[in-house]
Amino acid sequence: MADPQSLCDRYSSATYARMKADEARTGAYAAAIQRSVSGRVCLDIGSGALALLAVMAAKAGAARVYAVEANVEAFAAARRTVEAEGLTDRITLIHGYSTSIGALPEPVDVLLHEIIGELAGSEGVVRVLLDARRHARPAALSIPAAAASLLAPCEFPPHEYFAALPHPMLSSPAATALKLPQLPLAAISLAPPQRFEQLDFGEGGPEPSQRRELRFVAARRGVLRGACVHVELRLLDAEATDADVSSAREGSHWPNVLLLLPEEHPVEEGEAIVVATHAELAGEQPRYEFEFFVEEPSATSGEVAAGADASATRRRPLGKIYYPD
């Protein structure tokens, strides 16, 4: 899998069009920007061919927007967009990666970005945002305020799902992660999702190293094949109960990731599945590790009859998945 900077170079006009066409995502950003940027200096990181967030901010009354874009073709298209919008006096385009540019002419009040991958930190947003704070005032606002990744143990999607895809799915027989659009999460999940990655983009910045241990209780009998992942964004309130944007919702431009175990495992209703997660997010290539277990009674029937603790359990390992693999 490509590192985040290589991924940037592969973005196409179709990629930016899909992002803009995601009405929930685009509308949530527009509302947050409209409420927050008037009279303020903004930095748009990864502005893209449409310079979408930069244009939104300028039209919402931002005093100045610095828009950084590394992709050569996207930068040229962004310049044409800004000129066509008549905003060259309000938007300053800067070619390069935000982590490599020098100091800006002035400190910024608002950080704008959408460097969110199918796993929230997989496109390098932690490294980028920790670095971007050198351009910002101490209390600078980030839009979005927070992102999170959630995971649920799941079955393999049914044949009907793949048959309905507009294009055939190609993958290696040994693949451990598939990116799938509009995955039917509710239908294939064996338990409700839990959060394993939390990125708060406030003054302190997101935690670059994160570990969680998630314990799921199967809501029904099924065949465990791995775990499905979706991401959520909170645009202005990092502590909001409900996400403003979620890749689990219909119409999201983000595909969902299906993490595949080496083998399938039948599970019974009420059976416990444990997933230990580890994310290292500050490097040039963020890394994730997922280790799966099922809980089983540690005492045999004979031992229970002899007075052993029938509630004691042991963990049987099912496999480990790395992302990227």
Image (cartoon, rainbow, N blue to C red):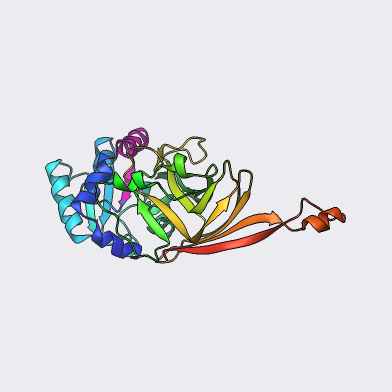
Residue 90 in the image: x percent, y percent?
A: 22, 44
Image side of residue 264 versus residue 169, left or right: right
The count of marks equals: 0
Residue 52 in the image: x percent, y percent?
A: 25, 44
Residue 133 shows in the view: yes
Quadrant in the picture for residue 276? bottom right
Residue 281 in the image: x percent, y percent?
A: 46, 61
Residues drawn in magenta: 22-44
Who's the residue at 29% across and 59% down the image? 170
Residue 122: say if magenta. Answer: no
Image side of residue 217 versus residue 235, left or right: right
Who's the residue at 44% across and 43% down the image? 185
Q: Nearer the viewer, residue 89 or 112?
A: 112
Residue 40: say if magenta. Answer: yes
Q: Main secondary structure of the magenta part?
A: helix
| Quadrant of the rendering where the C terminus is positioned | bottom left
Q: Nearer the viewer, residue 283 or 148?
A: 148
Image side of residue 275 versus residue 82, left or right: right
Q: Nearer the viewer, residue 139 or 14?
A: 14
Residue 53 in the image: x percent, y percent?
A: 28, 43
Quadrant in the picture for residue 278? bottom right
As drawn, the residue found furthest toward the right would be 306
| Quadrant of the rendering where the N terminus is positioned | bottom left
Residue 102 shows in the view: no
